[in-house]
Image (cartoon, rainbow, N blue to C red):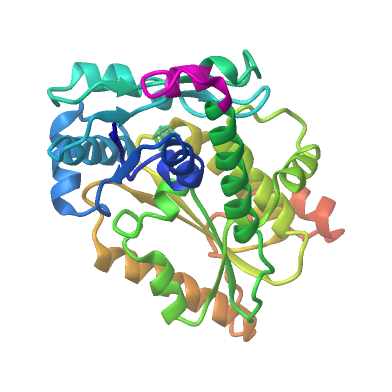
Amino acid sequence: MSWKIGIPRALFYHTYYPLWSTFFEALGGEVIVSPPTNKVILDQGVKSVVDETCLPVKVFFGHVATLCETKIDYLFVPRLISVEKRAYICPKFMGLPDMLRASKIKHPPLIKPVINKVKSTNVNSFLWDCASPFTGKWLNIKKAWQEAKQEQEKYEQKLIRETEHNDLNILILGHDYNLYDHYLNLGLWEKLQNLGCSIITPAQISKEERDHQLKKFPKFVFWTYGRNLLGSVYSFIEKPGIKGVINLTSFGCGIDSFIDSLIIRRLIEHQIPYLNIIIDEHTGEAGLLTRVEAFVDIIRWRRDDHQNYFPAHGYNVGSCERDARIHGVRCNCTPTSH
Ligand code: SF4
């Protein structure tokens, strides 16, 4: 008998869709994905969870509510704890099935495997949680999993492509579900491209490269999304051509608030301009465009030697020691002259 499983187009979808869709299809199911994010979906999500939740989780519940209005037999909401040894995703990911239970959304039976690579690398138990409602044959489950892993690998390899350089290369940082959701990022990619920028993302470096770069950081970074962002900053600033970095963060994200300050310190050392855009459900497109245009203007002026891009306020305050260390230049300031 054919069955339909719903996958919300949010959170893990933007990283792992090839894996899960291939897996369920190989088991004989039909995968139904919610439509791209829109205002109705966002509003539904906002109504479904508490105000303090971050924007991507609100959007997730909007997608869940939308999917549950269609005819699906199962809903896929994994309890994602960690996807690599020693590092975690985010506490909100692991609480998704509980948050759904606490919401008023009426949903079909959940497929909610626990994925925790910190605790165990044995895939059998979560594969069984995913597949046992549909088949009891291990051979079929293992075959479907192999196929799914291959598809995911192909997808990731496609993302790691040569950076197309122009003279305005911008690294956009952000979690996949912000970067690849056109509604959430308010068309940031197109806006930058229209301004003549070429875009680079964390997905364009391999996991090995990321881990290699992070060895330079004095402490182990134990959030996977934090590792992706910081590792890509470390990697790309060593390559020529990055003219600026934009970090697209979500209001209410604890991980971003930590990682942001580590990124800024690294970029200041390399004198790379930086823009942090914090999005929430009230963020407007016009305000975003103004900030992005101003940022790109500053980079252009700097490139054209029009003027220094640093504001008079801020950069030099208390930084003479650091300048002396990095550039071997010591200014003639007195402690009160900045
Ligand atoms: S990592 Fe941040 S943005 Fe993502 S779900 Fe957790 S709190 Fe929200």
How many marks do you count on the picture?
A: 0
In this orientation, which residue lies closer to the viewer: 327 or 55? 55
Q: Position of residue 336 (x, y in %)?
A: 63, 50
Q: What range of the chain is rendered magenta?
A: 126-139
Image height of 216 relative to 203, above or below? above
Residue 164 figure quarter: bottom right
Q: Which quadrant does ligand 1 occupy?
A: top left
Q: Residue furthest front?
A: 1
Residue 129 vertical position relative to residue 245 in the rendered view, above or below: above
The residue nearer to you, when weighing 95 against 32, is: 32
Measured from the top left, where is residue 199 in percent x and y?
55, 69
* Viewer-closest of 148 and 324: 148
Identity of the residue drawn at 45% across and 45% down: 17
Residue 287: quadrant of the picture: bottom left
Q: Which residue lies at the image location 87% right of the left edge and 58% below the top edge?
A: 328
User: In the drawing, does residue 67 fall left or right of residue 122?
Assistant: left
Quarter occupied by the C terminus: bottom right
| Spot occupied by residue 107 in the image (x, y as percentages of width and height) | 18, 26
Magenta includes 272?
A: no
- Residue 34 visible in the current orientation: yes
State whether residue 262 appears in this view: no
The quadrant of the picture occupied by the N terminus is top left
Identity of the residue drawn at 57% across and 48% down: 151
Residue 168 versus residue 47 in the image, above or below: below
Q: Residue at x 25, y 21 (%)?
A: 109
Instruction: Tell which of 231 and 115 is nearer to you.
Output: 115
Residue 330 at x, y = what percent? 82, 58
Residue 223 vs 245, above or below: the answer is: above
